[in-house]
Amino acid sequence: MLRRIAMRAIFSGILFIFSIYFTIKGFEYDYVNHSGQVGPGFFPLWIGILLVVFTGIAFFKDLKVVLKEKVSFRKPIHLNSILLLLAATFLFIALLNVLGAVIAMVLYVFAVLLILNRERLILNTIISVTVPMGTYLLLDVWLNAGFPTGIFGF
């Protein structure tokens, strides 16, 4: 139970830091436009302020409980899987413009499914091909959003 409280405090702290970052980024946009109407920075700024207030309250409440109790931090059970997923995500981001979005997504989804579910290799292969292809059809073909193209031209 105490470990769950500590993890909740860490999660609340990360959300609080993200909220502060989001609010700071909201200041980069105009609050009102030249005609006096609501500008592109109106909603990000107010949402950021509300996020800072509410995540700050949650974080400091959780921190108060953690400091009151004796909480020990142990190595997470699935630390290796978490680190592998993190490495796969960074590799996906790095290869996105090199290999192209479709190939990078196929490799990424396959790697993630292989890390999380090694027993179902055929299903993992089917999912790792169909999900990126469906994403490509939806975003690039139907919505014309555009995907990064790589050295293979797609």
Image: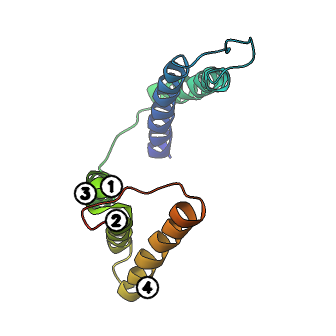
62 shown above or below 79: above
Residue 108, labelled with which disc? 2
Q: Percent from the top left, x then y, of residue 27?
A: 54, 16
Q: Residue at x 56, y 23 (%)?
A: 56
Nearest to N terminus: mark 3 or mark 2: 3
Quarter containing the C terminus: bottom left
- Tell me the quarter of the picture where residue 83 sits: bottom left
Q: Nearer the viewer, residue 142 or 56?
A: 142
Nearest to N terminus: mark 1 or mark 4: 1
Question: Label 1, label 2: how many angstroms apart (C-alpha)?
Answer: 7 Å
Kindly state the secondary structure of the residue where label 3 is placed.
helix
Q: Residue at x 47, y 73 (%)?
A: 133
Residue pointed to by mark 3: 98
84 shown above or below 42: below
Residue pointed to by mark 1: 89
How many other residues sit within 10 Å of disc 4, few (<14), some (14-19) or many (≥20)?
Answer: few
90 shown above or below 51: below
- Left or right: 125, with 29 as reference point: left
Q: Percent from the top left, x then y, of residue 35?
A: 73, 12
For badge 4, the amino acid type reads Leu
Residue pointed to by mark 4: 123
15 shown above or below 46: below
Q: Nearer the viewer, residue 101 or 53?
A: 101
Q: Percent from the top left, x then y, of residue 59?
A: 53, 27
The residue mark sitting in front, 4 or 3, is 3
For badge 1, the amino acid type reads Thr
The residue mark sitting in front, 3 or 1, is 3
